[in-house]
């Protein structure tokens, strides 16, 4: 075959030799291993989680008392904007991506994702997009028009602040789109033999729905961001009412993306919870198909509810009625999931490990967010609630007390698999309870603040409103959360001081990733597994009688994790080689971004770098 | 009482403590003071109780299961392997759907109820959102004022919401603000005002003020009193300072207020400090943005509306988005450096005013009763 | 020798659906791209006739001219099909000819677009003149950019064919570029109809 390069032969067409290092800094920069990329996503997202958290703490210090003096209005606006942007685009999305990257191939029985180099490209572009947006603090001011960037405020305000928003998010959007295509193909096309769609773990199903939500919602915000960027930079009139443009068009484009985005943020956590509960209840997920179909239904209906963010915009009673009803409808599949989770723990044998606590905490707290969500669908009530702290309470119950709790559960659950070391369970439980108390202290009183008349995004409030007491409680809650995060960091650091002794299957779990050693070898599976059932690994360990009673399969049977297989050295398995080109191609994008904001020649230089990266990529010899 | 329990249910026992000490802040959506806010509250209350009931059922089941089915030493680790139950699952799909139908019906009827244009004895008001203050125009009474909306009790007020900077002439407009510039006019560059949201929680829900559109809202107060409101849509640097008051008065008091507002400003006696201030006002930078009814420059009435109309400034209790009481000290501080008082203020003094000018202008402004 | 890359990225691997990964990825990407153009076209349609000042579409459009360049673009779909057929026969030389022909037709279209833009610009329609200028240039510009990227990919294919990366067995890369190229053509048919052919009343 003509394209094969024989080792030692002079490489034709390649600009750079394929990197060889398997350890150290460059091995991480050039890695195309989905597991390493997953860890990079996770570490980066956690770093941004701390940054966004510090921003939140400053916001809470400012609002702890009326007439706060900690942050000036301009800094406050930058902080709340960056807090939202960071937590959504640089924390919850990439933290979910970390789990997707690490787990999808392992859970479906594949050796890597469909396009390993594209996967690396997605990560680097996401990282550079995040750093690009944050570089705005040093380059004249960070985005200050809210994560929702409503026009015309975002297009008429002086300064480059919101240009960093539009260009930065465009980059992050490209990274996410590429990743979505890659992971969707991986799930659809690279399942192990026998892993039919309805034998996939629920987490994989939720991941698949998320990839399609990303693929179909991101192009819409891409158009909106370009239009906003052009209005600000090139004098177009998309959202300029003076020229006949309509600022409400931005709102439609933004929320047509923004609402599916909410499900992009929450479905991964729902998938994680659906994996954790059966393991620690030692029962199958109650109504697997219902949970899967409700997830798909949420994905579809999620595209039909966007205008519930705009009930006060003045769309008229017809539109408000339609979107109010569609929003109520989406509550139904969401409710289904909660009842199915309850069904899962019903009559189970519950072991309250840290992952289980976080999963149960997710359910308990997500219910609050779900129910307050239904009150927003009651359109006239939303006339009072929208743009108040009631909304802030609602979506933090969904995204912090929900999504972040689910993701923390996932970290505790898969930590031994990923790093080969257990996190300390006792410390984990302490962290859970502190975090739960903190979350409810922080976000619970916000319901009251909102109903008592505290609008969102205000830098200060007068003592006359009598909101000081609750705001102080909220601030105390926020610092309680910070304490819990510090405990987690301590737990994580301590885990690396312990020997790498986590067993392959510490939790007596159900899915394929637990069949391989902890941490898994680079090639994942010595032999690609053949799947016979949903929860295949569980059924290798336990048989089920007619009455549904568990009977362990005798030791030494097929149930043993394969980690002890003698021949399992991975010899003879070819893995994709590392590559410089993904990181090079990604590096061009922030240059283009700076070019759009500052000098056009930087954009040209950036485009050259991107093209060079892509050409090197296309002509890269397959392997050495 | 109901409100207290409602809060208590919202966040548990903690709420009881605070509900007891929450003062009446006049910006409380749980304390409706007129029929329109009341309609929302009447709808929200039962929905809240339904939600609370579901909350307790779900959390109760969660806690019950967690206790009842916790792992106990000595119990075999082989719970029954229940894969699901279609009948149950269909049940908990349909039951919430039925509850939601029950919620949707009153929701839809209230949406249309609130959207109806009021008839009969209706006061028309145009509300114009500026960065960062509110302009209130009474087209039928030919009054322009700012930050303090006076309304008669017991009568619906039909509010038309317009953003500043877009084809809005400053002169009291007919019943509706005219969105968009006249056809054929070249588009302006930047400087149009942005989206705001008009919200007086105790009298009505909120409605956005969107440049290029005219939205409407109906509000009504049952009792005389002062109700506070605030811009609820993020609108830039001083968003937090974009507040206002609604002053509900008996019909007689309102009529008296209207008559007073309709009067022209009275020029201060010649030779007084205030007269010097008036001269500074009319010959300086002020008239680029501010109008005073009854005063003229070169025989022309003042019409600018970039800043608040000052004709009866002293009849109002507050300025700067109703966050500062109108006092001599506050006016002086404002005139000395508006940017220092309000971040990003559109009021730019170039050149800055001397202390003599400030004294004279304040003396003049304080004659505008 | 089967190299590692081929395990993951070649068309010969058995996949769950039987469809090669790269082809499935292209389909997902094109579906995503549909929404990009969907949003752009929606913006254009929403602002149709909303310009407050001229020039309006009827003042600047030269329908016969654009029809010819549209035809050129459609013809390039035919040459693309011929290029794919050639490589699948193993006729690399013929493939290069047809690929270059496709690229040339694409360049003619983009050149025509550049000429059209400069003409409109001279007639007073700038990006910032009115909503028509804003929406027209951005919509057709996005499409033109897609065509330009397509041309780069076509030329890359020709270059890759000299390095042995394109062969009869490895013809899928050509097929993928073809999919993209046909998609961009179809999008143009929609844009041409919506923007040029449906009258705005102005």
Image (spheres, coloured by chain):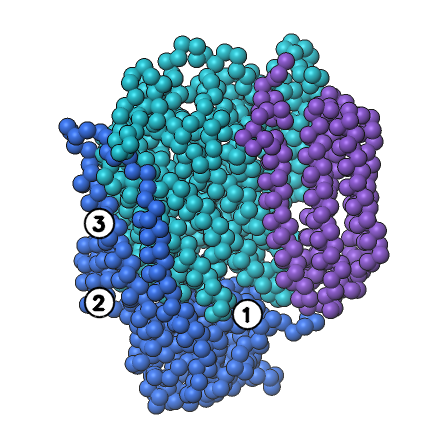
Chain colours: A cyan, B blue, C purple
Would residue A314 appear left or right of A328 to someone viewing this image?
A: right
Q: Are marks 1 and 2 in contact (CB under 8 Å)?
A: no
Which quadrant holds the N terminus of chain B? bottom left
Task: Count neighbours of disc 2 (C-alpha within 10 A) and say few if under 14, some if 14 to 19, many if 20 or more.
Answer: few
Reading the image, the residue beneath label 2 is: B2
Could you tell which of marks 2 and 3 lies nearer the N-terminus? 2
What is the secondary structure assignment of the residue under circle 1?
loop
Reading the image, the residue beneath label 3 is: B60
User: Residue at left 58%, top 72%?
Assistant: B179
On screen, residue A252 above or below B246: above
How far from the left and from the top, in percent, is residue A197? Answer: 47, 36
How far from the left and from the top, in percent, is residue C57? Answer: 75, 62
Cα separation, mark 1 vs mark 2, equals 39 Å
Q: Which mark is residue B213?
A: 1
Q: Are marks 3 and 1 in contact (CB under 8 Å)?
A: no
User: Residue at left 39%, top 89%?
Assistant: B255
Q: Chain of mark 1?
A: B
**Closer to the camera, B204 or A606?**
B204
């Amino acid at each position: 075959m003509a394209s094969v390069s024989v080792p030692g032969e002079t490489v034709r067409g390649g600009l750079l030799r394929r990197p060889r290092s398997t350890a150290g800094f460059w091995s991480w920069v050039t890695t195309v291993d989905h597991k390493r990329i997953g860890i990079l996503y996770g570490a980066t997202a956690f770093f941004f989680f701390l940054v966004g958290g510090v921003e939140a703490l400053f916001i809470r210090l400012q609002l702890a008392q009326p007439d706060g003096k900690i942050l000036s209005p301009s800094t406050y606006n930058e902080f709340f904007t960056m807090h939202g942007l960071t937590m959504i685009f640089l924390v919850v999305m990439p933290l979910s991506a970390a789990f997707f990257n690490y787990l999808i191939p392992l859970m479906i029985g594949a050796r890597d994702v469909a396009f390993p180099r594209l996967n690396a490209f997605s990560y680097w572009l996401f990282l550079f997009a995040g750093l690009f947006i944050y570089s705005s603090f040093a380059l004249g001011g960070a985005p200050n028009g809210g994560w929702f960037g409503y026009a015309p405020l975002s297009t008429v305000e002086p300064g480059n602040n919101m240009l960093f928003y539009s260009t930065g998010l465009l980059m992050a959007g490209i990274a996410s789109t590429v990743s979505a295509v890659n992971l969707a193909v991986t799930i659809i096309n690279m399942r192990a033999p026998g892993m039919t769609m309805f034998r996939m773990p629920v987490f994989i199903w939720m991941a698949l729905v998320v990839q399609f939500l990303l693929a179909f919602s991101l192009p819409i915000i891409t158009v909106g961001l370009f239009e906003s960027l052009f209005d600000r930079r090139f004098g177009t009139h998309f959202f300029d009412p003076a020229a006949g443009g309509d600022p409400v068009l931005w709102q439609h484009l933004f929320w047509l993306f923004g609402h599916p985005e909410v499900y992009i943020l929450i479905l991964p956590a729902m998938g994680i919870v659906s994996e954790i509960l059966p393991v620690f209840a030692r029962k199958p997920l109650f109504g697997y198909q219902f949970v899967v179909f409700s997830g798909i239904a949420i994905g579809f209906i999620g595209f039909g509810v966007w205008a519930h963010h705009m009930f006060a915009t003045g769309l008229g009673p017809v539109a408000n009625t339609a979107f109010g009803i569609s929003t109520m409808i989406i509550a139904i599949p969401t409710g289904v999931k909660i009842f199915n989770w309850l069904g899962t723990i019903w009559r189970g044998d519950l072991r309250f490990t840290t992952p289980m606590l976080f999963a149960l905490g997710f359910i308990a707290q997500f219910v609050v967010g779900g129910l307050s969500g239904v009150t927003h669908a009651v359109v006239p009530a939303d006339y009072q609630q929208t743009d108040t702290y009631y909304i802030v309470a609602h979506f933090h119950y969904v995204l912090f007390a929900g999504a972040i709790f689910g993701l923390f559960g996932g970290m505790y659950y898969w930590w031994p698999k990923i790093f080969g070391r257990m996190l300390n369970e006792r410390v984990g439980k302490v962290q859970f309870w502190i975090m739960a108390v903190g979350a409810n202290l922080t976000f619970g009183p916000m319901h009251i603040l909102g109903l008592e008349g505290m609008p969102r995004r205000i830098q200060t409030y007068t003592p006359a409103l009598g909101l000081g007491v609750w705001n102080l409680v909220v601030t105390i809650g926020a610092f309680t959360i910070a304490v819990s995060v510090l405990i987690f960091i301590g737990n994580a650091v301590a885990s690396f001081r312990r020997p790498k002794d986590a067993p392959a299957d510490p939790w007596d779990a159900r899915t394929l990733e637990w069949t391989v050693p902890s941490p898994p070898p680079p090639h994942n599976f010595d032999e690609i597994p053949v799947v016979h059932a949903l929860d295949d690994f569980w059924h290798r360990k336990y048989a089920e009688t007619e009455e549904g009673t568990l009977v362990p399969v005798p030791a030494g049977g097929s149930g043993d994790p394969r980690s002890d297989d003698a021949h399992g050295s991975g010899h003879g398995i070819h893995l994709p080689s590392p590559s410089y080109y993904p990181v090079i191609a990604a590096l061009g994008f922030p240059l283009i971004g700076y070019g759009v904001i500052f000098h056009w020649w930087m954009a040209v230089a950036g485009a050259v770098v991107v093209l060079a990266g892509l050409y090197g990529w296309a002509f890269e010899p397959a392997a050495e | 009482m109901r409100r207290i329990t409602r809060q208590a249910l919202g966040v548990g026992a903690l709420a009881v403590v605070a509900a007891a000490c929450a003062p009446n802040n006049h910006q409380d959506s749980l304390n409706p003071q007129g029929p329109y806010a009341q309609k929302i509250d009447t709808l929200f209350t039962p929905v809240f109780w339904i939600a609370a009931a579901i909350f307790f059922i779900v959390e109760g089941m969660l806690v019950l299961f967690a206790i009842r089915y916790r792992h106990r030493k000595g119990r075999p680790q082989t719970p029954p392997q229940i894969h699901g139950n279609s009948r149950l699952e269909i049940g908990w799909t349909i039951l919430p759907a039925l509850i939601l139908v029950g919620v949707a019906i009153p929701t839809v009827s209230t949406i249309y109820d609130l959207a109806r244009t009021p008839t009969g004895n209706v006061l028309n008001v145009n509300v114009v959102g500026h960065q960062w203050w509110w302009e209130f125009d009474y087209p039928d009474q030919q009054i322009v004022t700012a930050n303090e909306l006076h309304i008669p009790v017991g009568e619906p007020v039909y509010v038309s919401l317009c953003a500043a900077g877009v084809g809005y002439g400053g002169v009291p407009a007919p019943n509706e603000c005219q969105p968009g510039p006249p056809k054929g006019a070249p588009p302006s560059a930047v400087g149009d005002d942005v989206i705001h949201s008009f919200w007086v929680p105790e009298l009505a829900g909120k409605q956005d003020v969107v440049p290029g559109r005219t939205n409407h809202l109906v509000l009504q107060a049952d009792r005389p009193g002062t109700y506070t409101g605030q811009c609820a849509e993020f609108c830039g640097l001083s968003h937090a300072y974009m507040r206002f008051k609604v002053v509900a008065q008996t019909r007689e008091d309102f009529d008296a207020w209207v008559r007073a507002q309709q009067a022209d400003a009275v020029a201060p006696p010649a030779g007084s400090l205030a007269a010097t201030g008036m001269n500074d006002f009319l010959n300086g930078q002020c008239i680029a943005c501010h109008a005073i009814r009854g005063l003229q420059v070169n025989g022309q009435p003042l019409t600018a509306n970039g800043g608040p109309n000052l004709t009866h400034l002293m009849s109002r209790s507050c300025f700067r988005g109703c966050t500062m009481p109108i006092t001599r000290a506050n006016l002086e501080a404002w005139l000395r450096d508006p940017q220092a008082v309000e971040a990003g203020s559109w009021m730019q003094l170039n050149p800055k005013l001397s202390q003599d000018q400030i004294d004279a202008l304040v003396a003049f402004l304080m004659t505008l009763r | 020798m089967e190299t590692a890359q081929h395990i993951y990225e070649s068309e010969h691997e058995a996949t769950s659906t039987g469809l090669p990964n790269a082809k499935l990825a292209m389909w997902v990407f094109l579906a995503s791209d549909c929404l990009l153009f969907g949003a752009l076209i929606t913006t254009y349609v929403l602002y149709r006739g909303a310009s407050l000042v001229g020039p309006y579409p009827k003042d600047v459009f030269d329908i016969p001219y654009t029809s010819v360049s549209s035809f050129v673009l459609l013809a390039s779909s035919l040459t693309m099909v011929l290029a794919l057929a050639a490589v699948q026969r193993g006729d690399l030389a013929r493939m290069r000819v047809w690929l270059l022909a496709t690229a040339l037709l694409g360049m003619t279209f983009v050149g025509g677009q550049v000429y059209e833009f400069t003409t409109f610009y001279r007639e007073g329609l700038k990006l910032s003149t009115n909503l028509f200028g804003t929406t027209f240039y951005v919509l057709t510009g996005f499409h033109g950019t897609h065509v330009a990227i397509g041309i780069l990919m076509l030329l890359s294919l020709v270059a890759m064919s000299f390095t042995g990366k394109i062969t009869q067995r490895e013809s899928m890369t050509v097929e993928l570029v073809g999919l993209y190229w046909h998609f961009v053509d179809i999008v143009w048919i929609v844009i041409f109809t919506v923007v040029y052919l449906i009258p705005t009343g102005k």
